[in-house]
């Protein structure tokens, strides 16, 4: 696993507003893998709060340095209906965060003003706290420290993200629809969401699986296997990261399914 370098922007002194951050920022540099706990949030916002959600996507990866233990954050858009594809969603979005400790991650989920706003403004909201188990690659130069491997019968979550080379975008999107359609119908897949930092070129997938065996069966067969083979053969990605997580807690609903 490579060592990552993260340049993350933080707002000095006071907390940020719901909209844009202060323009003055300081830089924090991390030269080693981040060891900690991940939080993944998926939201379907009520129509009255779509504008608030768009502001979150535009500015939400800036955060106040008063957030205890927060070392990495991405506020992400989603595809139509929270799925995959080139059509962006007006209502669906996500967030990915890393915290130094499980206590700080839980405090953020259960006590922070930001999560309270999402709860009030969402038709559906899913939140997972996760411990990294295996990691390949990096995200904006950041990589995660690995934990214990997961047994074949253990529930797991996965995050796949990639920066797609512009010259390879058309080829990538020719392979993606079949792979993502097979994911939604894969035996043992409990949840799948398409996410992204930017249209077309910076994409991510979050999924939750009944067992590692079920996830491995999906990964090694059919359209997904073909898409991954093509990606490596033709060097579609300038950067990518794939993480398997041990779920620590799941809460909320997503596409009518309760995880409480």
Image (spheres, helix red, strand yellow):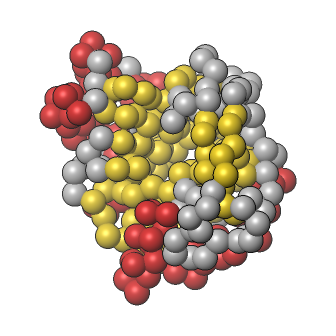
The part of the image, by quadrant, that contains residue 3 is: top right
The part of the image, by quadrant, that contains residue 107 is: bottom right
Residue at the farthest right position: 103
Would residue 172 be found to the left or right of residue 250 on screen? left
Looking at this view, is 91 or 186 the one in front?
Answer: 91
Quick check: can you spot residue 258? no
The part of the image, by quadrant, that contains residue 258 is: bottom right
Residue at the farthest top position: 233
Residue at the farthest front position: 24
Q: Residue 38: percent from the left, percent from the top?
A: 66, 46
Quadrant assignment for the N terminus: top right
Q: Residue 200: percent from the left, percent from the top?
A: 26, 45
Task: Give the residue at x 55% y 56%.
Answer: 61
Looking at this view, is 142 or 227 the one in front?
Answer: 142
Quadrant assignment for the C terminus: bottom right
How many numbered marks, from 0 up? 0
Q: Residue 87: percent from the left, percent from the top?
A: 22, 57
Task: Give the residue at x 42% y 27%.
Answer: 239
Would residue 210 be found to the left or right of residue 170 on screen? right
Indicate whether 132 appears above or below 116: above
Task: Give the residue at x 81% y 46%.
Answer: 101
Indicate whether 113 appears above or below 243: below
Quick check: can you spot residue 199? yes
Task: Give the residue at x 39% y 49%.
Answer: 196
Q: Residue 82: percent from the left, percent from the top?
A: 36, 59
């Amino acid at each position: 696993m490579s060592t990552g370098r993260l340049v993350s922007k933080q707002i000095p002194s006071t907390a940020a507003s719901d909209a844009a951050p202060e323009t003055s920022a300081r830089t924090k540099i991390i030269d080693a893998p981040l060891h900690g706990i991940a939080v993944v949030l998926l939201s379907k916002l009520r129509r009255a709060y779509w504008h608030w959600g768009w502001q979150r996507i535009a500015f939400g990866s800036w955060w106040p340095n008063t957030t205890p233990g927060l070392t990495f954050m991405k506020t992400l858009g989603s595809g139509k209906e929270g799925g995959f594809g080139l059509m962006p969603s007006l209502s669906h979005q996500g967030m990915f965060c890393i915290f130094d400790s499980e206590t700080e991650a839980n405090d953020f989920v259960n006590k922070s003003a930001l999560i309270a706003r999402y709860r009030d403004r969402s038709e559906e909201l899913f939140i997972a706290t996760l411990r990294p188990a295996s990691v390949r690659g990096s995200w904006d130069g950041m990589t995660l420290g690995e934990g214990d491997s997961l047994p074949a019968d253990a529930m797991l979550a996965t995050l796949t993200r990639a920066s797609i080379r512009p010259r390879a975008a058309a080829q990538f999107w020719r392979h993606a629809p079949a792979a993502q359609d097979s994911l939604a119908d894969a035996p043992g897949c409990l949840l799948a969401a398409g996410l992204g930092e930017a249209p077309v070129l910076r994409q991510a997938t979050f999924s939750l699986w009944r067992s590692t065996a079920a996830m491995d069966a999906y990964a090694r067969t059919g359209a997904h296997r073909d898409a991954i083979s093509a990606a490596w053969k033709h060097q579609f990605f300038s950067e990518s990261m794939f993480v398997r997580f041990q779920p620590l807690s799941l809460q909320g609903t997503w596409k009518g399914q309760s995880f409480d």
